[in-house]
Image (cartoon, helix red, strand yellow):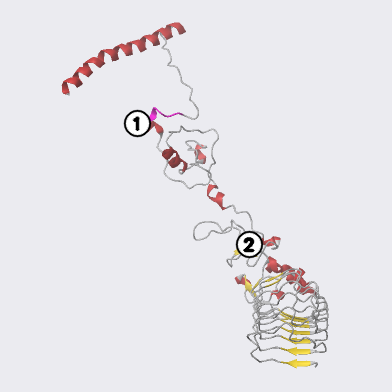
Amino acid sequence: MTILWIHSNNISLIEPGAFYGLNKLEELDLSDNTNLKSINPVTFRGLVHLHTLHLDRCGLLELSTGLFRGLFSLQYLYLQDNNLQNLLDDTFIDLANLTYLFLHGNKIKSLSENVFRGLINLDRLLLHQNRVSLVHRRSFHDLGKVMTLYLFNNNLTVLTGETMAPLVSLQYLRLNGNQWICDCQARSLWNWFKQFKGSSSELECHLPPRLAGRDLKRLQSADLEGCVDSFNQIRTSVFSTKTRSGKLPTGVPPLGSHDGSPKCCQPETDKSFIYEAKGKAGPSSHSSRPSSNNPLKDKENMSKTKYVETDPSKNGSNKQINDSPFGTFPSIVDPPLTKLKPEFLEPIEPSTVPTKKRQGCSKKNKSKAQCRLTQQGNSSTLQLSLSLLIPPLVWSLLLFC
């Protein structure tokens, strides 16, 4: 037996040894068995002469590791219209003679580095109508003989020229139906198309808005400046514009980018925390204020900022120094401590102890000794006056009580 067609049945399970002894089988068609879902890795072992295998529309959720091991003669593999989401590395490692690989109509999200390793004679690779959003830069490294590549109707936004470089035999390329970002990330692909001699579909730009609908291949070099962020806005600088909230936009990696994103779209350092401080004086190292030893008051003071009044005509006179944390918003100016009641001033311990000035002597005193005697006399007179006044006050209070 060389041909076996068992398609369009209701097969949901294939025993591992179902095809044992069919070593002359060349074509096997299992398509349209929608309840098959999965296949045991050893199901096709021994089919060394098999050149065509139909597994399309079988509801397959995955391709087991080693499923195609030993199928050295396989040339046509049909896996389209299943529910495949991931392809493991080295899934097709033994298929050195494979020429057609149909994977379209699945739910594949990404292509890893070694997913197509070993397919050194592949001629046609159909990956259209999937959900591919990321292609590793080395995904196609063994596909030097591929002449037809379909990647249309996926979720691609960026594809580098380095990724396409191994496809030296490529003649037919379709990349339409993707949401291409035509900024600096697309420059390497744009350069690759300059030397591509084959036939290609249009690559319709989705972003930025000024280039929407235009073909990436027909753009000028100057059109590929700047970087589009993941919020569909062009980010030229973190200081360019303010958002509605009044804050500057922060650096965000571009849509679909990962750790290996191009340098042109690496996020810049967020400098938004200093924009409000522009034009305002910073904290002075020479200004100090007394601490009230009151935590609530200290916390209140930290949230307040005094404006710096700039007047060129006065050459900086009558300035109030900003002694709040750098970058905070201004609020009500603290009242001067001189207006506080005396009882609140007693416990104040200034961070820098002020120097006390001695009371100056009048001109009548001829020497320092006479000055000291005069000061001592004044203090003793004050004490005597207080001692005379206190007893009458005490008696008055007792009478009223």
Look at the image and say whether residue 87 sits in the magenta stretch.
no
Answer yes or no: is residue 258 visible: yes
Q: Which residue is mark 1?
A: 341
Q: From the viewer's side, name the closer residue of 339 and 119.
A: 119
Secondary structure character of the magenta stretch overall: loop
In the figure, residue 65 lies in which quadrant?
bottom right
Question: What is the crowding at mark 2: few (fewer than 14 residues within 10 Å), some, or many (at least 20)?
Answer: some
Task: Tell me the magenta residue range.
Answer: 344-349
Residue 348 on the magenta segment: yes
Whether residue 367 appears in this view of the structure is: no
Badge 1 crowding class, 10 Å Cα cut-off, few under 14, some 14 to 19, many 20 or more, is few
Q: Which mark is residue 206?
A: none
Q: In the image, which is nearer the foreground, mark 1 or mark 2?
A: 2
Name the residue: 42% across, 40% down. 296
> Which residue does the numbered mark 2 point to in the structure image?
253
Check disc 2 and report its element: helix, strand or loop.
Answer: loop
In this view, 235 is above or below 28: above
Image side of residue 22 versus residue 237, left or right: right
Residue 139 is situated, as x and y percent measured from the top left of the image, at: 75, 71
Estimate the x, y position of residue 155 in percent, counting from the top left: 64, 74
Relative to 182, residue 364 above or below: above
Give, as a three-letter code, the residue at label 1.
Answer: Lys
Measuring 63% from the left and 62% from the top, which residue is drawn there?
253
Looking at numbered disc 2 in the image, what kind of residue is underneath it?
Pro
In the rendered view, would you say 33 is above or below 116?
A: below
